[in-house]
Image: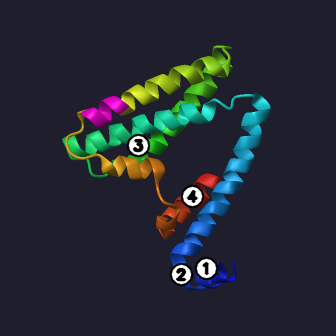
């Protein structure tokens, strides 16, 4: 343990990883409590699968149409926000239970992601790194993004 503490003081990438983990734990604790009390735990899987659709669409637009400003991160963020808004609007306006729209978005997001990834020419290793990532590769810019999203 003391070796890790010494390494933490010496290596910025470890500092960023610990800070990212702490920020993520704050956000997950708050959102997790809400999700469990509302009994909509299925929502995490739905939004995650919609994120796959956003990643695939952004990468497709980058490669096929040459829009370099549309990054997979922005596609994922946009898809997550849109799917959360759709779930919220349907549950408020249509008086439907959340699990109905959550299940539909799960399937739609996954299908769109697979379609866009298959239609994108070239090797798609970049998308796998976005989906699974590596906490030791968190940069200062990533840390700022995580902090803003946590707030």
Q: Say the numbered circle drawn on residue 146.
A: 4
Give the distance between the C-alpha atoms of the residues marked 3 and 4, in whole angstroms: 16 Å
Residue occupied by mark 1: 8
Q: Earlier in the sequence, mark 3 or mark 2?
A: 2
Residue 29 location in percent, x, y? 73, 49
Q: Bin the neighbour count of mark 2 within 10 Å (Cα to Cα): few under 14, some 14-19, many 20 and up.
A: few
Number of the front mark, 1 or 4: 1
Answer left or right for 66 relative to 51.
left
Depth check: give the residue in front, 46 or 1: 1
Residue 107 location in percent, x, y? 47, 23
Residue occupied by mark 3: 75
Q: Say the numbered circle drawn on residue 11.
A: 2
Residue 20 location in percent, x, y? 59, 63
Say which residue appears at 63% left-offset and 14% top-offset.
Answer: 94
Residue 113 sits in which quadrant? top left
Say which residue appears at 45% left-offset and 47% top-offset.
Answer: 131
Whether pointer 2 and pointer 1 mark residues with C-beta atoms closer than 8 Å, the reply is yes
Give the distance between the C-alpha atoms of the residues marked 1 and 3, in whole angstroms: 33 Å
Locate the C terminus by quadrant. bottom right
Q: Main secondary structure of the magenta part?
A: helix
């Amino acid at each position: 343990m003391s070796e890790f503490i010494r390494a933490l003081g010496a290596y910025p990438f470890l500092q960023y990883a610990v800070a990212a983990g702490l920020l993520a734990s704050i956000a997950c604790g708050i959102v997790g409590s809400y999700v469990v009390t509302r009994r909509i735990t299925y929502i995490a899987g739905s939004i995650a699968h919609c994120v796959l659709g956003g990643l695939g669409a952004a990468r497709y637009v980058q490669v096929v149409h040459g829009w370099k400003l549309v990054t997979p991160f922005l596609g994922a963020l946009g898809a997550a926000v849109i799917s959360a808004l759709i779930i919220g609007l349907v549950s408020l306006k249509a008086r439907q239970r959340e699990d109905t729209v959550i299940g539909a978005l799960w399937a739609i997001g996954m299908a769109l992601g697979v379609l866009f990834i298959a239609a994108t020419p070239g090797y798609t290793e970049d998308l796998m790194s976005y989906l699974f990532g590596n906490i030791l590769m968190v940069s200062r810019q990533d840390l700022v993004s995580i902090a803003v999203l946590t707030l």
